[in-house]
Image: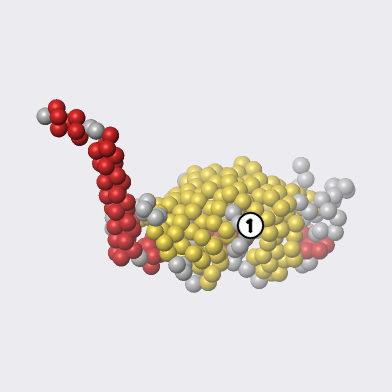
Amino acid sequence: MKKRLKKFLAPANIINVIKKIIFYEIAALIGIIIALKLFFPGDFVISKINEAMLKTDYSVKAVDSYYSPLKTVSFDDFSLLESGKKIIGVQGAQISPSLGTMLGLSKSVDFVLNDFNSSGGELAGNVDVEKASVCFDVDAEDVSFLLLKTLLPDMAGKGTLNGTVSFCRSKKMNGEIDITGNNLVFGGKIKGLTVKPLKLGTLSLHASIKDNKLTIKKADISGALKINITGKVVLNPTRLNFSRPEIVVTVIEKEKGTIASLSPIDLALEQFKDEKEKQNLTYRFSVKGMFTNPTIKKERSK
């Protein structure tokens, strides 16, 4: 027995055993990849993602798919669509559906999206869908400002966003928003109104959501205009456009002529002008009611 054990523990035999283990592991990994390709093709993974997004107006599509040994599927030319219309495109995407998702037992997906609209940046996170709720956790790193096309499909702009967004939506919404932006330029068509390119500069937004109530802790924009927003929004989880804001907006012109260049927005702002401010054009107004038909009134200067 000792001789057999000594022979087995000989360096040459140990090396051979290690080689066999490595060979079998590599063979197993190749087998897993082939099995994934045969039984879970890229279209299957895309269909599962779209199935998980049925509660929204969004869907995804991609061109080519590749598999790694760690259940990660990589796609080229990955697109996010709203009602069938492409609003965001990324050059590369890596999606890791859980095994439960692939077998139809759950709906949870990790993702990494790279190079938004050929502008660089990375968006990573997780989507978890249960019977009565949808949860998102997203981390943005130098992502194109055009990511907001998910909310405003006809907008145009430049700049980058960084930060995190996490929330769950069911009968009630809860979450946190912590976003910063740099070198932002905003324009395009917004609800039928054409907005000329406006230099927003920097953005700092921090808000919390608890039981459908979004509390704005900080919302500042500093560029050609200085914009500050305070207050809260009572959210409608099923129809966000029916949410009810209770906010106060202050707009200060930092670069002369900016307001005048925003025709016809300049005419709409005129009624909210703070006559007491002599150094810079300043406007203060409150927004209440529903987003679909808000009541906007002039606010007195503090």
Q: What residue type is labelled 1?
A: Phe
Q: In which quarter of the image is the N terminus?
A: top left
Residue 255, position as x, y percentages in the image: 83, 53
Q: What element carries label 1?
A: helix
> Image point 78% across, 53% down: which residue?
224
Residue 120, position as x, y percentages in the image: 61, 57
Quarter occupied by residue 243: bottom right
Q: Can residue 40 be seen in this view?
A: no
> Image point 67% across, 65% down: which residue?
156
Q: Can residue 3 be seen in this view?
A: yes
Q: How many labels does the image show?
A: 1
Quick check: 58 left or right of 15?
A: right
- Name the foreground residue: 68 vs 41: 68
> Image point 61% across, 41% down: which residue?
217
- Name the foreground residue: 253 vs 297: 253
Q: Quadrant of the C terminus?
A: top right
Q: Taking 122 as reference, is 5 above or below it?
A: above
Q: Which residue lies furthest to the top in this view?
A: 2
- Name the foreground residue: 52 vs 95: 95
- Name the foreground residue: 66 vs 131: 66
Residue 34, position as x, y percentages in the image: 31, 61
Q: Residue furthest right?
A: 278
Q: How crowded is mark 1: few (under 14 residues within 10 Å), some or many (20 or more)?
A: many
> Image point 43% across, 52% down: which residue?
110
Q: Taking 90 as reference, is 178 above or below it?
A: above
Q: Name the residue under label 1.
A: 145
